[in-house]
Image (spheres, rainbow, N blue to C red):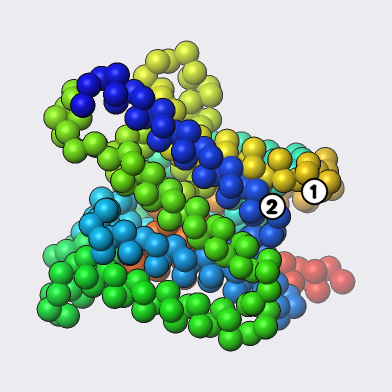
Amino acid sequence: MQESELIELTQTVLWSAFAAATVFGAVAQRTHFCTMGAIADIVNMGDWTRMRMWVLAIAVAVVGFNAMVGVGWIKAGDSLYAGTRLLWLSLLVGGLMFGFGMVLASGCGSKNLVRAGAGNLKAWVVLLVLGLTAFATLKGITAVVRVNTVERIGLDLATGQDLPSLLAPALGTTVPSAALALGLLLGAVLLAWVVCSPHGRAPAVWLGGVGIGGVVVLMWWISGRLGFVAEHPQTLEATFLATNSRAMESLSMVAPVGFALDWLLLFSDKTKLLTIGIVSMAGVVVGSAVMALASREFRWEGFGNVEDTANHLVGAALMGVGGVTAMGCTIGQGLSGVSSLSLGSALALVAIVCGAVAALRYQIWRIDHMA
């Protein structure tokens, strides 16, 4: 591949990622897709409607990802989620921090990006703090703490930590075949749970679930298939174009916010290049803004009082540190990571949910105590 062709392909990858993320923002704004909201609906009202939307998105992402693995388009091992070292303590601690923080901040990273596009000024403050703390946990002071504490403890596996790689030898089959079978099986089980209730058959649930899950699959294809170069003309190595991790990527909403701030602050530094993660953050905001304006839901909103401000600042910091420590958020681990059938992603997701439930219970206790 010639240098000019590589540049053109990189631009195609970036524009494709931006377009896909714009769809994500529009769908999330239209359907009120929100993981924290789904958990809060259950804890506070016993309403499982938005949870079924989220589970439907997981089902679509799982089937789509593993179908591509089955036909040989991508490999789970090319992502960050299926490595051979299972950092279980990091995933659990980071997940708990992120889950608790997203309740204090009125939503996870993706929800705050969507709210920012719809005119919520609180969300912009949350994103700034989240981005700063995330970048510090990637390369700064909290990164030193992370590396020297929770990341010292892990479990080394003989294969990748994705279920197809772990189970293929026992099943007597190849990893692609195991991925296809397990993906279809798990997807069918999740889909059956979604539609077993009338609420799971609502049009909004299907628009949000299929739309969000489909974007996650599309992002995997953009990064792992469209953006894959078998031999980079400069390094002569296999390369995934326009990624911060140098691995195959899909949507995630914590570390990319930090990389976006880094790109903006050091824009004149020509070594700072746009990546899939950075343009995706812009795409989500743009998509949300377009949908909010079209539906006349765009509203300026600020902090109500000092306590509201403090909660959002603390929540944003917990999400920034926790999201990087857990290697992802409700989208990065809860959809993108889980779609690869990664054991680590499942642990992170459980920890995120537990952290969110704990925060919601804390808020209920505090309201009762104040009353």
Please tell me which residue is depicted at 49% across the width and 18% down the height of the picture.
267
Query: Marks 1 and 2: in contact by CB < 8 Å?
Result: yes
Please tell me which residue is depicted at 40% across the width and 40% down the height of the picture.
138
**Relative horizontal placement of residue 32, taking residue 167 as reference (left or right):** right
- Which element carries disc 2, helix, strand or loop? helix
Quarter of the image where the N terminus is located = top left
Name the residue type under label 2: Gln
Q: Position of residue 19 (x, y in %)?
A: 53, 40
In the foreground, 190 or 201 = 201
| Residue 147 drawn above or below residue 162 | above
Q: Position of residue 199 (x, y in %)?
A: 68, 79
* Mark 2 lies on residue: 29
Name the residue type under label 1: Ser
- Using the rendered image of the protein, determine whether residue 194 is visible from the camera's viewpoint: yes
**Relative horizontal placement of residue 316, taking residue 225 as reference (left or right):** right
**Relative horizontal placement of residue 35, taking residue 365 as reference (left or right):** left
Q: Position of residue 323 (x, y in %)?
A: 48, 51
